[in-house]
Amino acid sequence: MEFQVIYHSARSLVFELQKEGIYETKEYEIYLDGVLAGKGSRIIQSLYGLKPDRTYRLYLKRGEECSETITFTTRKESVTLNVRDFGAKGNGIQDDTQFIQAAVLSCPEGGRVYLPKGIYKITSLFLKSNLILEIGKNAVLSAFTDRRKFPVLPGLIESYDETLEYNLGTWEGNPLDCFASVLTGINLKNVEICGEGTLDGCADFDNWWKNPKEKEIAYRPRMLFFNHCEHITVTGITVKNSPSWNIHPYFSKNLRFLDIKVLGPANSCNTDGLDPESCEEVEIAGCYFSVGDDCIAIKSGKIYMGRKYKVPSRRIWIRQSLMKDGHGAVTLGSEIAAGVYQLSVKDCMFIDTDRGLRVKTRRGRGADSVLDDIVFENIRMNRVKAPFVVNSFYYCDPDGKTEYVASKEKLPADDRTPCIKSLKFVNIRCENSHFTGAYIYGLPEQKIESLVMENIHITYAKNAASGMADMMEGCEPACRQGIYLHNIKKVILKDVTVTGCIGDAFICKEVEELENSCSQDLFSRTSRTPLQKNI
């Protein structure tokens, strides 16, 4: 067995097994200083209960198989502040917000704020730099649902000289008033949120999810919101029942999300799992998502924020994670006016999501809305309705319901026209698909520049359902459709098989150049015309 420690702090660590599969493996034992410290079955696993500034020896064992021993030293810790000492009751009744906030504000650099077992009722907590917040085992930060208790983050505040602006609140890519999140960080550095406990938004259809698109005082809060923050690490915790998006990093960088769970009912409203917006250097590893909207959605603002600040999301790495039940497993958009660059998704499982990869863009997002170097590698999908979807005509929201967005005619390319450059999919198996294997549709005036599909194998469910691949005019309901490609400059196919589809395995329209080295007779079902260039 091979493993490495990928993160450790004063009282916890996260390790990752090597060459053991995707997300889960056979159960193994964890030994710390020669003593059994627990068992695990996940590729990425956390360990808690360590002591600060202490050297440990760690190894793993499975039957007669034993790993090498790794030696590491935990970080120093200046002090631990127990929130009970500040007046928090954790009895599920008292409003503990001010008592926990007092502990946070009193914590010195390098200190830890600790929540022991209990249910702590709160509204919004504001974090500060150089802080460790540990939510202990069986501890729950349980949010109130009365919106009158929550502070509001204004969308735009004009500067004194009337030339600049200060942006605090945001809602779906626009600078709008929103409620402060349950955990809120603004202009922070060096923060760790960790533990075996839970952050519960307590949202349901009688409160936050009722009339979800309507603004009442302000827009709905998130569970964790990081605005212009750096070096933030979140490990171990469970986040559930969010009023809207669960975790929302915003104009932030150097972020790590390791071994966390993000949960919400499959029918909950806009409960995206983790949405980095205009962020860079983001690592998402060993995480479990089961939510009511996109599991992970990469964003960079709607038109105003994208054009004004021009901050794309870039260098985002997602691995060894499991996505379930959401609309999209990993989505780009639709608010991507400043673009997305260098996204890597590898060694992940997508189960029961509506779509695997999902790109949502449209005319009007602008010339800065460039998607480039997007790579999906070594992915396993099961019961995903439409594994690959790229939609350049996404019609959600009022500005998407125009003829300009919907038209399939070649319109002039201008400063409103988005661009998709490089998409690469390698070593992906999709089993029990439903609507379509892939539905990839570029703009006629700005075709997708490059699509590579290598070692891709798609099969369909025996009782496959019928439905639309995505939200765009002209996308008809389908069942067991093959791979549909439209408006792409160059397509490279290598070892791609589609088994069990109805009709042609491949449908290509307005593809300028095709390199096909597949052994399958891709048009054998309904046509004797071989796949060729310039179809």
Image: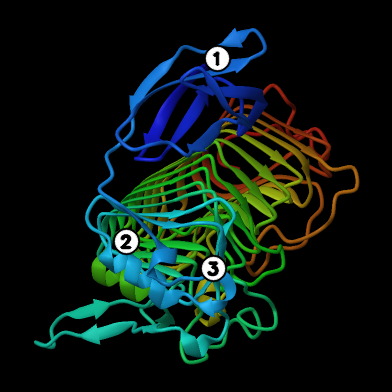
Dot 3 or dot 1: first in sequence order is: 1
Circles 2, 1 touching at the beta carbon (< 8 Å):
no
Name the residue type under label 2: Asp
Front residue of 82/314: it is: 82
Circles 3, 1 touching at the beta carbon (< 8 Å):
no
The residue lying at 61 percent from left, 23 percent from top is: 29
Residue 115 spot, x, y in % from top left: 46, 59
The circle on residue 90 is: 3
Name the residue type under label 1: Met
Residue 523 spot, x, y in % from top left: 75, 35
Q: Secondary structure at mark 3?
A: loop
Q: Taking 311 as reference, is 468 left or right?
A: right
Q: Which residue is mark 1?
A: 1
Q: Taking 283 as reference, is 478 left or right?
A: right
- Image quadrant holding the C terminus, namely top right
Q: Which residue is mark 2?
A: 368
Q: Is residue 302 visible?
A: no
Name the residue type under label 3: Gly
Report how far apart the C-alphas of labels 2 and 3 lie in the structure: 48 Å
**Are there few (<14), some (14-19), or many (20+) residues within 10 Å of tag 1?**
some
